[in-house]
Image (cartoon, rainbow, N blue to C red):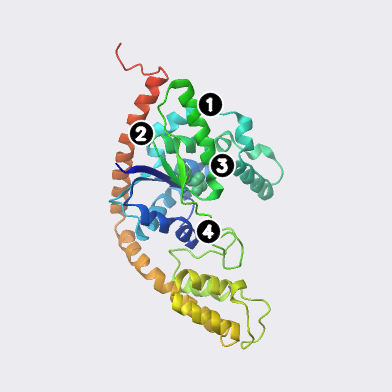
Amino acid sequence: MKKTILTGLRPTGNLHLGHYFGAGKTWATIQDDYNFYLEIADVQALTDNFDNPQKVRENVYEITKDLISIGIDPNKVHYFIQSQIPEIAELTVFYSNLVTVSRLQRNPTVKTEIAQKKELFGNHGESITYGFLGYPVSQAADITCFKGEVVPVGDDQLPLLEQCREIVRKFNSIYGEILIEPEQVLSESSRVKGLDGNEKMGKSLGNAIYLVDTPEQIQQKVMKAVTDPKKIGKDDPADPNVCMVYYYHQLVNSKENNEKICAECKKGERGCVQCKKELIDALNTFLTPIREKRKYYDEHPEEVKEILKRGTSEAREKAKETMQEVRKAMKIDYERED
Ligand code: TRP
């Protein structure tokens, strides 16, 4: 029997290279080894974007197409839309009794996100909604509704997983051993830096390369990438290890080419403009098969909808089974005759 794995993504924007190298690539390699549930977490996306439902709606399809085009096979993985599984919402309500408000406020992931919001919107704590504070509870329901045994997430998500494990232990100690305490696999701490050298790649920072970027967009972005500031003239030797162009070469170019690039750069035998042009070519070569696959699904939106419909219905079967056990354990299974 294959173990059950569950992971999720918020549909708030297209996937970029950080998503690919930090997560998607690994998911594609393990999809044969697990019973794999992949949640498009639209309800969670709405906690931050409740006033922009159209954005969330569009990105459900965008993200699904991104994921399929990087090789996460819809015939192997259950792609599902969170909002279409009402059992998750039901379980979230039951879990809300098992976690204190102060515990949520102390959750490091939530704390960081609240601090970021304060930075963006000023120091009014009132902007934190009940739904936002509670999203870790909802995420615990996401995982346990499908009896997820393993969750492939990055270190920033670990406090959410720990919160989930606590809720499971509490539930099981009160109502009986029904739920599974999930574990983290494959720590994806290898976060991909932005073209500007920032530790994080993101839309708001304008430093990301998206899988859907056109060759023109890629050219513009790479030309602005940060190189060794000590290198002034084209023939000055430089340190590739402080250069974002070399950093990206290492992601998408061959080992052989990279050895050459590194040696030439150190000896001052390589200009940055030439090096950027080669990176643009390497990125386009890397993205070509992804773009081709994506083009097919852009032209066949009904197939994307069908994939989500099928995955959601498979996922819902599992969620219904779990909820029958949960309701029985909580003595609210009134449809049962006794
Ligand atoms: N919180 C995750 C993120 O922001 C997305 C997510 C939702 C998730 N539900 C999940 C991740 C369940 C793992 C398991 O990226």
Which residue bears the numbered disc 1? 98
Q: Residue furthest right?
A: 123
- The verdict on label 4 being within 8 Å of ligand 1 is no
Is residue 82 visible in the rendered image? The answer is yes
> In the image, what residue occupies the spot 40% across and 18% down?
332
Which residue bears the numbered disc 4? 190
Work out whether 239 lies above or below 182: below
- The verdict on label 2 being within 8 Å of ligand 1 is no
Q: CA distance from mark 3 to mark 2?
A: 24 Å
Percent from the top left, x then y, of residue 118? 68, 46
Which residue bears the numbered disc 2? 319
**Which amino acid, by three-letter code, is at mark 4?**
Ser
Q: Quadrant of residue 113?
A: top right
Circle 1 Cα neighbour tier, 10 Å, few/some/many (<14 / 14–19 / ≥20): some
Work out whether 56 lies above or below 171: below
Q: Quadrant of the C terminus?
A: top left
Q: Who comes first in sequence, dot 3 or dot 2?
A: 3
Q: CA distance from mark 3 to mark 4?
A: 18 Å
Question: Element type at marker 4?
Answer: loop
Q: Who comes first in sequence, dot 3 or dot 4?
A: 3
Percent from the top left, x then y, of residue 191? 54, 58
**Which amino acid, by three-letter code, is at mark 3?**
Pro
Q: Who comes first in sequence, dot 2 or dot 4?
A: 4
Which residue bears the numbered disc 3? 159
Q: Who comes first in sequence, dot 2 or dot 1?
A: 1
